[in-house]
Image (spheres, grey):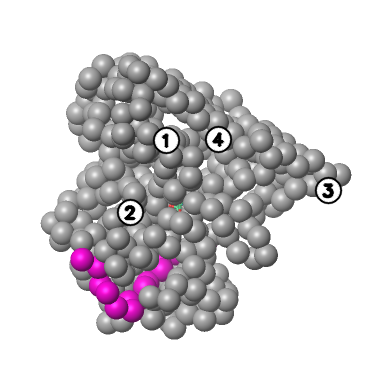
């Protein structure tokens, strides 16, 4: 990919928590000469325009995406609202940064992937955890063969229940599609599959339960076991219903990788930096009214995008965003997830949900129609 090698125009569609982080970084990136914003919530968008000095704001994504100044577009809308703005940006031939999940419906995800492939666009998906230093270091050692051939991966994700409460409360519809695997487990699955690059899933067997989160229209936990085409076993488990007093502000992850000549054990639970205070610690995003999030202990660094110091974000999302701006400008090769990775991740997470629903093993390749329409 050659890169534009000139100042470029950036459109950010969706000015919520993540669109804000990426737009603020764009404001400070020297290669971006024009910044336009869109959100259906005008107040949210105007606030971000004021804070970033953006050149343009509209509540209509078509109006932004068809502006002649725009070369690249970030899609940072809510999970169920990615597809239409993506297709509009593909039509304009923009470089694309799309927040995960690619879509929340497998057929829509396939449609988006095909459109991107047909247009031969450079597009990446926001799997931010690839940019956490420990995973980059592990990726390199697995790639250079330090542990031989990988034969088993064990992944365990624990999440504070605040994340699903927020995600589900802002979803107007298709709530049943917002499962722990599709929304959050997709990050840990992506990192695990990235570390197992080249292996293809042949079957999955999974189970879910919903004792706590059924009141919000989602599940508590999904545990699954995958078999890959070379016999590698992959155990992928997520629980996103931990009580709001859990010290992990958002997430904690453990990944163990077993190879024929070694093993790598990754501790990403953030239990190494603990704060305890008589003051209650703030959940990193606004919770619906009436939800009590009083919490006095925090595993610092457990906010996936990174950590705030003096009003600025430092960590994986800064590296991910700025290196994508470099990619657009200079053509830099970066470790971002591809649209093919994004589609595979959605299909794999939905297959775990289907296996849990049917109580049987699902074989791959899976018929996308079997993954079904989201039910409410
Ligand atoms: N990469 C990561 O680590 C990471 C972390 C959290 C969330 N996410 C993903 O980022 C996306 C956004 O999440 P968020 O936490 O910022 O949500 P958010 O609710 O804070 O922001 C989403 C914004 O999109 C706007 N919106 C919805 N439909 C729109 C449309 N058609 N046109 C214009 N604006 C529209 C909403 O009004 C809202 O302001 C989601 O897909 C989420 O899963 C990624």
Nearest the viewer among 357 and 222 is 222
Q: Which residue bears the numbered disc 1?
A: 138
Q: Distance between the residues labelled 4 and 3?
A: 25 Å
In terms of sequence position, does the residue under pointer 1 or pointer 3 come before the other? 1
Q: Where is residue 177 in the image (x, y as percent from the top left)?
A: 41, 40
In terms of sequence position, does the residue under pointer 1 or pointer 2 come before the other? 1
Q: Which residue bears the numbered disc 3?
A: 279
Q: Position of residue 6 (x, y in %)?
A: 29, 78
Q: Would residue 110 be visible to someone looking at this image? A: yes
Q: Which of marks 4 and 3 is in front?
A: 4
Q: How far apart are marks 2 and 3 (CA)?
A: 41 Å
Establish if 23 lies above or below 376. below
Q: SS of the residue at dot 1? A: helix
Q: Which mark is residue 253?
A: none
Q: Which residue bears the numbered disc 2?
A: 334
Establish if 25 lies above or below 55. above
In terms of sequence position, does the residue under pointer 2 or pointer 3 come before the other? 3
């Amino acid at each position: 990919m050659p890169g534009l090698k000139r100042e470029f125009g950036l459109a950010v569609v969706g000015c919520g928590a993540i669109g804000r982080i990426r737009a603020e970084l764009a404001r400070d990136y020297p290669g971006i000469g024009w910044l336009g914003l869109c959100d259906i919530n005008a107040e949210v968008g105007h606030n971000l325009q004021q804070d970033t000095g953006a050149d343009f704001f509209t509540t209509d994504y078509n109006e932004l995406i068809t502006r002649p100044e725009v070369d690249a577009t970030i899609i940072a809308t809510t999970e169920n609202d990615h597809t239409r703005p993506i297709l509009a940006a593909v039509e304009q031939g923009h470089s694309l940064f799309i927040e995960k999940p690619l879509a929340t419906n497998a057929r829509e995800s396939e449609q988006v992937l095909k459109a991107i492939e047909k247009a031969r666009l450079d597009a990446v998906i926001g799997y931010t955890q690839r940019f956490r230093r420990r995973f980059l270091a592990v990726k390199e050692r697995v790639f250079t063969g330090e542990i031989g051939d990988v034969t088993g991966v064990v992944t365990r994700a624990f999440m504070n229940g605040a994340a699903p409460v927020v995600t589900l409360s802002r979803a107007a519809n298709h709530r049943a599609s917002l499962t722990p695997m599709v929304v959050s487990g997709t990050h840990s699955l992506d990192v695990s599959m990235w570390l197992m690059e080249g292996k293809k899933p042949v079957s999955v067997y999974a189970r879910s339960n919903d004792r706590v989160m059924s009141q919000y229209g989602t599940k508590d936990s999904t545990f699954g076991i995958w078999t890959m085409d070379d016999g590698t076993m992959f155990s992928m488990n997520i629980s996103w219903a931990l009580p709001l007093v859990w010290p992990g502000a958002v997430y904690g992850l453990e990944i163990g990788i077993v190879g024929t000549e070694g093993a790598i054990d990754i501790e990403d639970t953030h239990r190494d930096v603990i704060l305890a205070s008589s003051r209650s610690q703030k959940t990193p995003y606004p919770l619906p009214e009436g939800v009590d999030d009083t919490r006095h202990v925090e595993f610092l660094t457990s906010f996936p995008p990174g950590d705030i110091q003096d009003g600025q974000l430092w960590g994986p999302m800064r590296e991910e965003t700025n290196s994508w701006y470099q990619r657009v400008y200079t053509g830099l090769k970066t470790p971002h997830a591809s649209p093919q990775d994004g589609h595979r991740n959605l299909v794999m997470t939905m297959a775990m949900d289907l296996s849990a629903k049917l109580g049987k093993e699902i074989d791959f390749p899976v018929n996308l129609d079997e993954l079904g329409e989201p039910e409410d």
